[in-house]
Amino acid sequence: MIRGGSGTHGATGGCRYSGHPLTRDRPPRSHSRVLKTSRRPAEDTRPVTSLRVAVDIGGTFTDLQILDEATGIAHAHKVPTTPDDPSEGLIAGIREACGQLGVGLDRVRAILHGTTIATNAVLQRRLPAGAVITTAGFTDVLEIGRHVRKRVYANRAEPRALLVPRSRRFGVVERVRADGSVETPLDEASVREAAERVKASGAKAVAVAFLHAYANPAHELRAAAILQELLPDVFVSCSHQVSPEIREFERTSTTVLNALLMPVVKTYLSKLEARLAAAGITAPVYLVQSNGGVTTPAIAAEQPARLLLSGPSGGARAAEVLAAGLGEPNLIAVDMGGTSYDVSIVHEGAIRLVTQGDVDGLPVRLPMIEIRTIGAGGGSIAKVDDTGRLHVGPDSAGATPGPVCYRRGGEEPTVTDANLALGRIDPGYFLGGAMDLDVTGARRALVERIATPLGLEPGPAADGVVAVATARMAAAIRLSLFEKGLDPKDFALVSFGGAGGLHACDTADEIGTARVVFPRDPGTLSAWGMLFGDVVHDLARSRLVVADAAAVPALRAVVDDLRAEADALLARDGIAAADRAFPVTLDLRYPGQAYEIGVPLESPSALAEAVAAFHDSHERQYAHAERHLVPEIVTVRLAATGRLARPAPRPFDAPSGGRPKSSRNARVGGAECEVDVWERAAIGTEVVIDGPAIVEEPHSTLLLPPGWRLAVHPTGALIATRRGA
């Protein structure tokens, strides 16, 4: 359904509250503690006055970071995800965390929520029946696509992922030219006829994507009004509001995804609102977007496609913050949870935003943090196929039933089962002792499903599962770096997520990186990164014009229009004028190219500097630049940014000395050995640990293989270095 909003390029909707609860009472300092008891930290007896909660709902666990805004202390917490209704796990996590802090739920002042609800709905195709209404003659845009073929010499093209069949794609009489002028007026009778056909088809959501609607949205707006009148219970999404850019295929695909996700996300947000109300939590909720910013539920319900990388974007944002604190401008950020493995790159101190992504073969033309995701998590299932090949992932055991060792009915061995069988995980200390793992069951599943079919002993079979998973992770990292012309040797690997520490050094060995960073609270780092998000509205306007001096007046007019729209949106969100920022970027390309490169624009009068930056960027990415050519502007982008209060740098109270808490038998490097086990909180800054060793903390375990050395950074991060590097 269309609910308010104005303009052709901005998000619709707004806050229900005046003022912004995240811009006041900035915390003086911040460090993290894992919740273990119901008592407050002994060194701080001040009462908790307000909490800011960041929640990252993953496929297996729901991670929380609870920031005490009075003291700046952030507390980590973790609970199992509830797949049937993720809001149930969210409320349970907040309730448990507040209970252990000894405060009431009424102290929660704001909730920053990262969610995979949109991504999972697309991946699992749990979407309602949808329809497309487009310009007559263009009903096959989704099916034609871009003629991109992965198998170039095959005699048949690969089947294309289609969310709307041809029987539910309807054309109406209208035509707008690329300059926005009307060639054929909208035939409202054909729209009404299409509405009747939509009703007869049983579709619950409709994507309206007319040709060149980004240049003139009048026909889409009128068609949407007619659809709302005739089909009041059907969700309607217009392309000019979702992706106001050229390229009809990508714009249509994005609008279809948005339309189909509207009922899914609205249903979830309604459940969440009801559960929060029942729990007595009246704090506003902000949804984390794919671009790393946050938005209100009203806007998220209208533009749910902006949530497709909601969860992983928090980890990328955390890596950017870590890069500044560690003095490591180049980081490979890898987030290994229970279901997925997310790779993002921090280069020269900044994460990279792209204007188009891909979700399961479906193009999404929206700004998002560049993240590569594969199905390789702790819950990834290991199988032997009919040819005797071992596969790990992408299928996952998820939270229910989960790995065999969870004792929840799982029967297929996973990466977590393999690590447990190898002695790398303490079965009595998983989640800080909150969950007791079944070692016998994990070993039995590995023997029956992996070792016996492959004719291997149990130890080498478990080694094989870990090795295949690690190889897949390394391949994802190489692809993320090599496609940008970057060398792994120039980067450090920063590992987080509950399962990441067990594979990080082996993965670094695979790609040729000699340094690995293990940040504090790695099991909930994505949630911590969400505390650094700002309110962001991505605005765009496509204008094909040569990027020379003659374009400056027209460019200034476009930027001024976008700036006015951005100001209105941030004012509606309660962002003070002093906390607003309006960075502008230009999508530029050489004449005849089919792709663009985004470069920052300081001001319209600085267009020549932006063009020079484009030439430099093109040479860096593609090893050549046509500096004698004048590029053309394709799209002007403005990120309406409302800066929110952020946690201060986290001081680290380093312990003195330190010694292993125990030792145990584990299989490392293909051999059984006695391995020292350290408690992370007890490692002093003067301690240097040589592998093999295991470092434990409540929400993750770190494996240091032979040949690696570990030390404590002044920030509290652990730095592993390959000896001799």
Image (cartoon, helix red, strand yellow):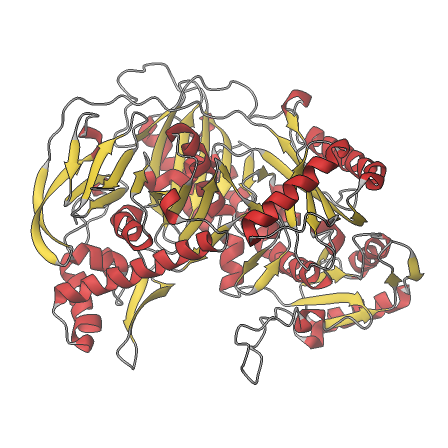
Placement of the C terminus among the 4 image quadrants: top left
Residue 471 location, quadrant: bottom left
Note whether 200 is above or below 251 in the view shown: below
Direction from residue 181 to residue 413 in the image, left or right: left
Task: Give me the residue at 46% from left, 36% from top.
Answer: 320
Q: Is residue 185 visible?
A: no
Residue 442 locus on image (x, y percent): 19, 61
The picture places residue 387, in percent across and down from the top left corner, at 29, 81
Say whether residue 86 is left or right of residue 401.
Answer: right
Residue 86 showing in the rendered view: yes
Does residue 181 sit above or below 154 in this rendering?
Answer: above
Q: Residue at x 28, y 24 (%)?
A: 39
Position of residue 561 relative to residue 162, above or below, is: above
Q: Residue at x 53, y 72 (%)?
A: 150
Q: Point out residue 199 in the picture as x, y percentages from the top left corner.
A: 74, 69
- Taking the image as shown, residue 568 lies to the left or right of residue 506, namely right
> Which residue shows up at 53% across the image and 44% down it?
352
Question: How far across and down, in percent of the image, does residue 552 sit?
Answer: 81, 37
Q: Residue furthest front?
A: 628
Of residue 233 and residue 193, the one placed in the foreground of this image is: 193
